[in-house]
Image: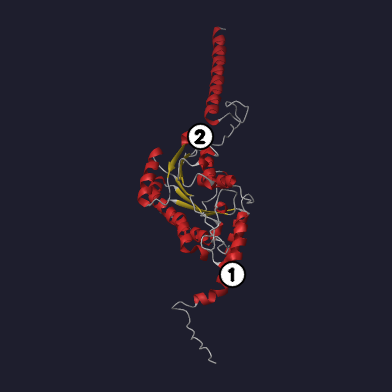
């Protein structure tokens, strides 16, 4: 009887230890992988619940964004901060009243640094400022060339003066910023985002000749492991190109009626644009971080934003392909190994 009692005691004790171990294992499992999807004990013979592995946390990026007092730049600063990233935002003047219009929430201020920087200051000055900016958090992961000069006017009246003003910011300023930031981007294997315009695809619009030319001049660079994204937005409701006065400093009488109609058209645009700049910048952050709309998608070289921009790019591409198809035979006939055809002399009258 004594031996039988000892046997029952040992059996009960072992069962207690087994149940306790099972409960402990279930608890440890819930700490590291979340609660089990099954109510059954781990000690039961049924298959344990399969818990999907959690995705690793996203890397906190350091953005350097130019032209952030208004427009896309200001919206992008907020979008990046709200995703948990850090932002170095450049403005031409830290005393600009525009900075007070839409202040960043106080809990995000620790991840924001504003610096005075004009992209036309020259490569040497910009290198000093960008190197100092990189020292704030030890790196730069994303350069966004957003600063732009949106001048509107008729090409002949504006002449090279208007073209040079547009190119100083939109081309040479962008090239200088890219040049001085590339060493940091190579180290971080980061990316460059160039904010272009649909105007590069729609150069026949009166009044935006210099602006269109400057945006078309910079289309793509792909050095080392640095990815590049060219953004071509259509008409968005920002404090952008259409808020600038139409160039009328050197009027030519032959253009009086054209100038008047074109200037009126541009002045009527603000407030009617269909594009939402906040949504546009959210998509841009998605692509840079590989989240949301860009999750599991390859990196795009171009991002066309807005119904009008998409329509213009498609129209330009279709028209170009039609011309290539029409003249393909002529274009291929100029090679050394092409069959030579004697020129037909013109008939003199």
* Closest to the observer, 332 or 21: 332
* Closest to the observer, 28 or 281: 281
Q: Is residue 237 left or right of residue 180?
A: right
Task: Report the residue at 45% width, 54% height from top.
Answer: 169
Q: Which dot marks residue 314? A: none
The reply to whether residue 116 is in sight is yes
In this picture, is 37 found above or below 241? above
State the residue position of label 2. Answer: 108
Whether residues under marks 1 and 2 lie with C-beta atoms below 8 angstroms apart, the answer is no
In this picture, is 104 found above or below 294? above
Q: How many marks?
A: 2
Residue 327, percent from left and from top: 55, 74
Residue 67, percent from left and from top: 48, 47
The reply to whether residue 224 is in sight is no
Q: Quadrant of the N terminus?
A: top right
* Closest to the observer, 237 or 34: 237
Task: Report the residue at 52% width, 32% height from top.
Answer: 106
Task: Report the residue at 57% width, 66% height from top.
Answer: 255
| Mark 2 neighbour class, 10 Å CA radius: few under 14, some 14 to 19, many 20 or more | some
Q: CA distance from mark 1 to mark 2?
A: 51 Å
State the residue position of label 1. Answer: 322
Q: Is residue 222 left or right of residue 47?
A: left
> Where is residue 295, by image quadrant?
top right
* Closest to the observer, 131 or 292: 131
Residue 119, percent from left and from top: 43, 50
| Mark 1 neighbour class, 10 Å CA radius: few under 14, some 14 to 19, many 20 or more | few
Dot 1 or dot 2, earlier in sequence: 2
Residue found at the far bottom of this picture: 349
Residue 80, percent from left and from top: 51, 41
Q: Quadrant of the C terminus?
A: bottom right
Local secondary structure at mark 1 = helix
């Amino acid at each position: 009887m004594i031996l039988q009692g000892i046997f029952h005691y040992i059996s009960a004790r072992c069962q207690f230890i087994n149940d306790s171990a099972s409960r402990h294992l279930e608890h440890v499992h819930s700490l590291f992988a979340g609660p089990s999807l099954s109510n059954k004990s781990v000690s039961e013979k049924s298959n344990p619940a399969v818990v999907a592995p959690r995705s690793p946390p996203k890397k906190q990026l350091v953005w350097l964004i130019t032209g952030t007092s208004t427009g896309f730049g200001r919206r992008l600063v907020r979008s990046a901060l709200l995703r948990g990233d850090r932002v170095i935002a450049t403005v031409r003047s830290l005393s600009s009243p525009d900075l007070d219009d839409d202040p960043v929430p106080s809990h995000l201020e620790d991840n924001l640094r504003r610096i005075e920087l004009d992209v036309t200051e020259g490569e040497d000055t910009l290198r000093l400022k960008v190197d100092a900016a990189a020292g704030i958090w030890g790196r730069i992961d994303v350069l966004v060339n957003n600063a732009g000069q949106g001048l509107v006017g008729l090409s002949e009246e504006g002449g090279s003066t208007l073209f040079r003003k547009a190119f100083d910011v939109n081309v040479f300023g962008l090239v200088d910023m890219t040049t001085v930031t590339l060493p940091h981007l190579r180290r971080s294997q980061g990316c460059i985002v160039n904010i272009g315009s649909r105007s590069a695809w729609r150069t026949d619009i009166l009044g935006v000749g210099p602006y269109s030319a400057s945006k078309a001049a910079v289309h793509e660079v792909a050095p080392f492991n640095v990815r590049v994204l060219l953004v071509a937005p259509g008409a968005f409701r920002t404090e952008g190109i259409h808020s600038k006065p139409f160039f009328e400093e050197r009027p030519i009488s032959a253009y009086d009626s054209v100038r008047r109609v074109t200037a009126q058209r541009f002045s009527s645009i603000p407030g009617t644009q269909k594009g939402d700049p906040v949504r546009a910048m959210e998509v841009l952050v998605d692509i840079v971080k590989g989240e949301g709309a860009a999750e599991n998608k390859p990196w795009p070289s171009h991002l066309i934003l807005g119904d009008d921009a998409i329509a213009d790019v498609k129209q330009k591409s279709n028209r170009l392909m039609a011309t290539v198809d029409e003249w393909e035979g002529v274009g291929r006939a100029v090679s050394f190994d092409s069959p030579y055809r004697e020129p037909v002399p013109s008939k003199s009258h």
